[in-house]
Amino acid sequence: MTTVQGTLTLRTVEGDGLHFDAQFPAGTIALDSGPHCVAPNPVLHLLASLAACEGMDVISLMRKKRQKVTAYDVLMSAERALEHPRRYTSITLVHRLTGTGLSRAAVEDALRLTVEKYCSVYHCLRPDLKITNEIELIEG
Amino acid sequence: MTTVQGTLTLRTVEGDGLHFDAQFPAGTIALDSGPHCVAPNPVLHLLASLAACEGMDVISLMRKKRQKVTAYDVLMSAERALEHPRRYTSITLVHRLTGTGLSRAAVEDALRLTVEKYCSVYHCLRPDLKITNEIELIEG
């Protein structure tokens, strides 16, 4: 086991604001919600954490495979239930990789390893949350 | 259903960096990993998103209950497995509320409602991830 620690602090003590800062040795994360929010809300942070966790594994594996990636975006979309607790019911991540002569098989293999073996965030989510990963390759 | 969308972009295309930015209408989230990281990694974002999601619900409920909170921190700690995918196995959140004459029963009720009904992030996590919520009250 390894232990992770940090402190979350409410910044908007007065009024009805919901601005929190989470402080870790690696930096501070701002989270907010509501009509006048100054930062993304917690469910957006969850979506970003899944996409980036997968993305870090995929780009690391592509580099090991000597694939020359010149740009990498992940288009994130997710559906939330209307009823409380308004949880995600499905998430779709489109991995859009740009490069010269990228191998689709290499990306598929990287994504498979990521999902099956490496992605810490993916494996923290409930199994009935449907996560779909797609691949889009652009030559350039 | 409501739909959430955003784009994650790799900033460190050259070299072996893992810096990604997630862009949403509400703002940008920076995520990074490794020895020279400039932002917290995805699993820290996941931990912050859970703590802040609970925290936003708890402070909203405490305000509705006319409880006068003058400071609110959540002490976050979590255990990760050593083996891939190195997922969280347990998370402990200590809700430290400061205020004048705060009612422990009011905080307990707010936390119970948060976990059972409101917290979107909590309900996205796998059921065997053990989440413990504790309450610490400080007069002042």
Image: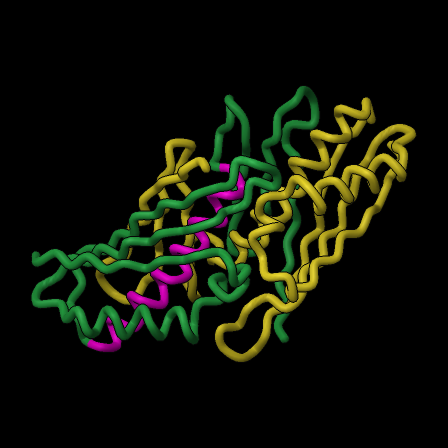
Chain colours: A yellow, B green
Q: Give the x, y percent position of residue A117.
A: 68, 41
Q: Give the x, y percent position of residue B89.
A: 48, 49
Q: Is residue A136 toward the left or the right of residue B6 in the image?
A: right
In this rendering, is residue A132 above or below A25? below
Q: Is residue B140 toward the left or the right of residue A134 in the image?
A: left
Q: Residue furthest bottom?
A: A83
In this rendering, is residue B67 above or below B135? below
Q: Is residue B56 magenta?
A: yes
Magenta residues (range): B41-65
In this rendering, is residue B60 above or below B10? below
Predominant SS of the magenta segment: helix
The residue nearer to you, when weighing B133 against A106, is: B133
Residue B32, can we see it? yes
Instruction: Tell me the quarter of the image containing the C terminus of chain B.
Output: bottom left
Q: Give the x, y percent position of residue B86.
A: 56, 40
In this rendering, is residue B77 above or below B129? above
Q: Give the x, y percent position of residue B28.
A: 53, 46
Residue A11, can we see it? no
